[in-house]
Amino acid sequence: MRKAAAKREIKQERAARTRLEIMEAAITLFARRGILATTMSELAKAIRMTPGALYWHFPTKEDLLLAAIEELHERFLSEFQELSNEQRRLTARQQLEAFLGRGQQFLRYHREYGIFFGMVAVESAYTNDRVAESIREKLEVYVGVLENIIHHGQHRTKEFRTDVDAHVAAHSIFGGFMGTLLHQNSFRESVAYDPVLTTWLMLTADGINPKR
């Protein structure tokens, strides 16, 4: 019985590793080509797996997309967990800069993760309701964090301008971040990542300060 249980555990571990490998490859491929232009057959070929083996792990492209979205969301949350524990000691501006700066730092080495989210959000909006809803749910978590920071800066610490709605401002800031990321990727041969994102962060942080 122990040998059977051990073998079963090994198989489960292998299956879990294979799923992660598939998702990593899919995220990169979808980020480069988009979800509509990428077929499961092409993905199977890219990761040197038979289509049948790929479909055993993920019966449909939708299943793969939903799993990849969940996986990346968990990674993002883990990345920001330490920061969220420290935020109470920071001013509202420091919180804003820390949150956006952490995102910049994380995506510096995993740019395809952010591009994947952007590509999926755009393409699924009119093509797949389940995927679109899933991506919106995840993005709303990050927008919600920004909204809380902005509201705190407006009404508690009085650091931020009050002539903008916190909810709308949060969407604008997060949308600006995603847009800047995608734009830089389009011009990556001539425009470096860090200068573009750092400049955007500086202009954003200054722009939400009260008018002088």
Image: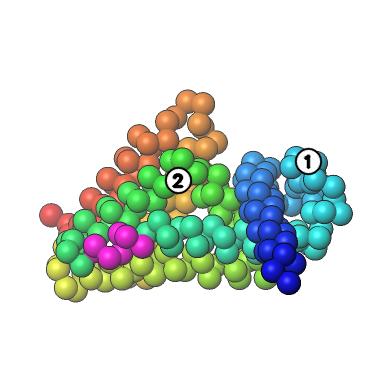
Residue annotated with mark 1: 48
State left or right for residue 5 relative to residue 187. right
Circles 1 and 2: CB atoms closer than 8 Å: no
Q: CA distance from mark 1 to mark 2?
A: 27 Å
The answer to if 85 sits in the magenta stretch is: yes
Identity of the residue drawn at 60% across and 69% down: 134
Element at label 2 = helix
Dot 1 surroundings within 10 Å: few (below 14), some, or many (20 or more)?
A: few
The answer to whether residue 164 of the structure is visible from this angle is: no
- Looking at the rendering, the stretch of residues picked out in magenta corresponds to 81-87
Identity of the residue drawn at 62% across and 48% down: 24
**Of helix, strand and loop, which mostly describes the magenta segment?**
helix
- Looking at the image, residue 129 lies above or below residue 80: below
Res 198 quadrant in image: top left
Q: Position of residue 93 (x, y in %)?
A: 21, 57
The total number of labels drawn is 2
The answer to whether residue 95 of the structure is visible from this angle is: yes
**Toward the viewer: 161 or 96?**
96
* For marks 1 and 2 on the same chain, the one whose residue lies earlier in the sequence: 1
Name the image quarter holding the N terminus. Answer: bottom right
The amino acid sitting under disc 1 is Arg
Q: Position of residue 172 (x, y in %)?
A: 40, 59
Identity of the residue drawn at 55% across and 53% down: 118
**Toward the viewer: 149 or 61?**
61
The amino acid sitting under disc 2 is Leu
Q: Position of residue 164 (x, y in %)?
A: 29, 67
Name the image quarter holding the C terminus. Answer: bottom left
Here the colouring is: rainbow
Residue annotated with mark 2: 107
